[in-house]
C-alpha cells in the first residue's frame, strides 16, 4: 500500500462541542415536564444546526493535516489546507484527484476528526506491454502508462496489432479501443487457463480479429481463430497443454480453430 506524507499546520487545539451537558440536562427537564414531542424535536434540530455551524466555523475543525501518497508522480489539486473539514466535498475531491492522477486505479478520501484528511490511492498494476511507437505498460482496465521504453520488458507479454487507422491509442489514459479491450480480455482468460500449467505468454496478436494468435515463451504459437469463438477455443487449450507436458513435447504450433486441436511438430 502506498506510503503517505503528513502535512501539519499550527498546533492542534482541543475541540469544543456546542451541545454540552447543560443542553442535555435541559432536554431531560423538558421531557420530565411533559413538553410536547414537537418542542423537543425542534430544540434538538436547532441544537444540531448550532453544532453544524460550530463545526464549520470553529478553528478547531479546520484542515491541518493531509495524509497522501508520497510517490514522485503524485499530483495534488488546489490547496485545501485550512478549509473547514466539514465543508470539504470528499467525493468531488476524489474525482479531481483521479483526473489528475490517472495512473492510480482508485482514490478514496476520508475525514478524520477533528482536522485531518486521509487520501488512499491504489496504483495501477501492469499486466502486459503494448507495442506502439515504443513499448508502453498496460493494465487490466486498458490504461496505457505514459512513459514508454525502446525495448520490451522480458517479464511481461507483448500486445501487438491494437492500433487501427483513425483509432490511435493515447498513453496516459484508459483506452477503449475494441482491439485493445479484446487483447486485455484474452490475456485475462489465458492467465486463468494456463497458470496451473506453468506456462507464460510472450506475445498476443489481435491485428486480425478473425485470426487471433498468441505465443508462449517456449516458442509455441497458438492459433485461436475468430474473436467470437475465443471461449470455445480456450476450453481446448488446457487439455492439450497437459498432454504435451506429459509427453515432453514442444510443437511448433497448436491450432484450435477446428473441432479437434491440430498439433504442428517442429
Image (spheres, grey):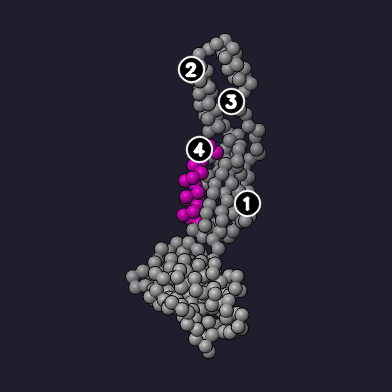
Residue 18's tag is 3
At label 3, counting other C-alpha atoms closer than 10 Å, the crowd grade (few under 14, some 14-19, many 20 or more) is some
Mark 1 element type: strand
Q: Establish if 222 lies above or below 172.
A: below
Q: Position of residue 223 (x, y in %)?
A: 46, 79
Mark 3 element type: loop
Q: Write down the residue under mark 4.
A: 87
Q: Residues at badges 3 and 4 in contact (C-beta under 8 Å)?
A: no
Q: Mark 3 or mark 1: which comes first in sequence?
A: 1
Q: CA distance from mark 2 to mark 1?
A: 48 Å
Q: Looking at the image, which residue is at 51% across and 86% down?
A: 252
Of residues 7 and 112, the one drawn nearer to the viewer in this rendering: 112
- Main secondary structure of the magenta stretch: helix
Q: CA distance from mark 2 to mark 4?
A: 30 Å
Of residues 201 and 247, the one drawn nearer to the viewer in this rendering: 247
Residue 38's tag is 2
Q: Nearer the viewer, mark 2 or mark 4?
A: 2
Q: Quadrant of residue 132?
A: bottom left
Q: Nearer the viewer, mark 2 or mark 1?
A: 2
Q: Is residue 233 magenta?
A: no
Q: Establish if 55 lies above or below 159.
A: above
Q: Position of residue 166 (x, y in %)?
A: 33, 70
Q: Quadrant of the N terminus?
A: bottom right
Q: Looking at the image, which residue is at 51% across and 26% down?
A: 49
Q: Looking at the image, which residue is at 46% across and 73% down?
A: 233
One can see residue 207 in this view: no
Magenta-highlighted residues: 85-101
Amino acid at each position: 500500500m502506498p506510503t503517505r506524507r503528513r502535512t501539519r499546520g499550527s498546533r492542534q487545539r482541543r475541540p469544543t462541542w456546542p451541545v454540552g451537558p447543560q443542553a442535555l440536562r435541559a432536554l431531560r427537564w423538558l421531557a420530565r415536564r411533559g413538553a410536547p414531542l414537537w418542542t423537543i424535536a425542534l430544540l434538538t434540530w436547532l441544537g444540531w444546526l448550532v453544532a453544524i455551524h460550530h463545526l464549520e466555523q470553529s478553528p478547531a475543525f479546520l484542515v491541518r493535516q493531509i495524509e497522501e501518497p508520497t510517490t514522485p508522480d503524485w499530483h495534488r489539486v488546489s490547496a485545501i489546507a485550512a478549509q473547514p473539514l466539514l465543508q470539504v466535498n470528499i467525493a468531488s475531491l476524489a474525482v479531481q484527484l483521479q483526473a489528475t492522477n490517472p495512473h492510480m486505479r482508485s482514490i478514496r478520501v476520508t475525514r478524520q476528526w477533528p482536522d485531518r484528511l486521509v487520501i488512499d490511492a491504489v496504483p495501477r498494476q501492469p499486466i502486459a506491454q503494448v507495442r506502439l511507437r515504443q513499448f508502453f505498460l498496460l493494465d487490466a482496465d486498458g490504461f496505457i502508462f505514459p512513459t514508454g521504453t525502446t525495448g520490451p520488458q522480458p517479464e511481461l507479454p507483448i500486445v501487438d496489432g491494437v492500433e487501427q487507422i483513425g483509432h490511435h491509442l493515447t498513453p496516459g489514459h484508459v483506452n477503449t479501443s475494441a482491439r485493445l479491450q479484446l487483447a486485455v480480455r484474452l490475456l485475462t482468460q489465458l492467465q486463468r487457463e494456463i497458470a496451473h500449467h506453468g506456462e507464460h505468454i510472450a506475445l498476443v496478436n489481435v491485428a486480425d480479429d478473425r485470426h487471433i494468435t498468441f505465443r508462449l515463451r517456449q516458442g509455441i504459437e497458438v492459433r485461436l481463430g475468430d474473436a467470437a469463438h475465443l471461449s470455445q477455443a480456450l476450453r481446448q487449450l488446457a487439455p492439450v497443454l497437459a498432454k504435451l507436458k506429459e509427453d515432453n513435447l514442444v510443437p511448433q504450433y497448436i491450432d484450435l480453430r477446428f473441432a479437434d486441436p491440430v498439433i504442428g511438430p517442429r
